[in-house]
Image (spheres, rainbow, N blue to C red):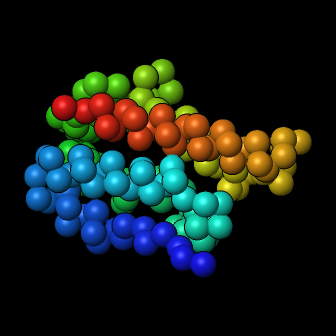
Amino acid sequence: MTTMNFLTKEQVKNEAKKGPKTAKKCSIEHWRQLSTATPAELEAMANVWGAKLLGVDFCALCGRYLGKKGCLKCPLADKYGVCNLFNSDNAWEAAVSAFDDWFFLWRTWDTPRQQLWERWKRASKRMLKQLESLD
């Protein structure tokens, strides 16, 4: 059985430094990996990193644009709103919520874990599409 070779924090950090196009490409690749991972692959990474896997440490756009004043000039924030705002059109918050439900909270829900996984897959694919739509 082969497992996905997820990007590392160090790779993401290095890609963020290379420039806007490289940061965007790296963020797209990270979300492509997240959205195509099997449950076993994602669970293995999540057991190490938890929700940080979806956070700033693994986002080259955050590595490039996040500063003391927020997400200045981040193309994702400019187009869809800041990632952690509930009232924005940005897909990140819904993806994080779906991930948390699938990985952390599934034992407390009446919803079967497979349904939570399908919700995560839809949310992660929506996030990927938003990243791919950036100029």
Image location (x, y in percent) of residue 121: 59, 44
Task: Give the residue displayed 68% in from the left and 56% down from the top.
Answer: 103
Q: Is residue 6 above or below residue 112?
A: below
Q: Classify residue 69 by image quadrant.
A: top left
Tell whether 86 sits left or right of 81.
right
Q: Nearer the viewer, residue 67 or 93?
A: 93
Image location (x, y in percent) of residue 62: 28, 49
Task: Give the residue displayed 42% in from the left and 51% down from the top.
Answer: 32
Judged from this view, the residue extending furthest toward the left is 19
User: The C terminus appears in which quarter of the rendering?
Assistant: top left
Image location (x, y in percent) of residue 33: 45, 57
Q: Classify residue 127 by image quadrant.
A: top left
Tell whether 112 sits left or right of 122.
right
Judged from this view, the residue extending furthest toward the right is 110
Q: Nearer the viewer, residue 19 or 28?
A: 28
Q: Nearer the viewer, residue 131 or 66?
A: 131
Image location (x, y in percent) of residue 11: 27, 69
Q: Is residue 97 visible?
A: no
User: The N terminus appears in which quarter of the rendering?
Assistant: bottom right
Task: Give the residue displayed 48% in from the left and 34% down from the top.
Answer: 126
Task: Give the residue displayed 34% in from the left and 25% down from the top.
Answer: 80
Q: Is residue 128 visible?
A: yes
Q: Is residue 101 above or below residue 48?
A: above
Q: Is residue 57 above or below residue 119?
A: below
Tell whether 48 sits left or right of 116.
left
Q: Classify residue 46 by image quadrant.
A: bottom right
Number of callouts: 0
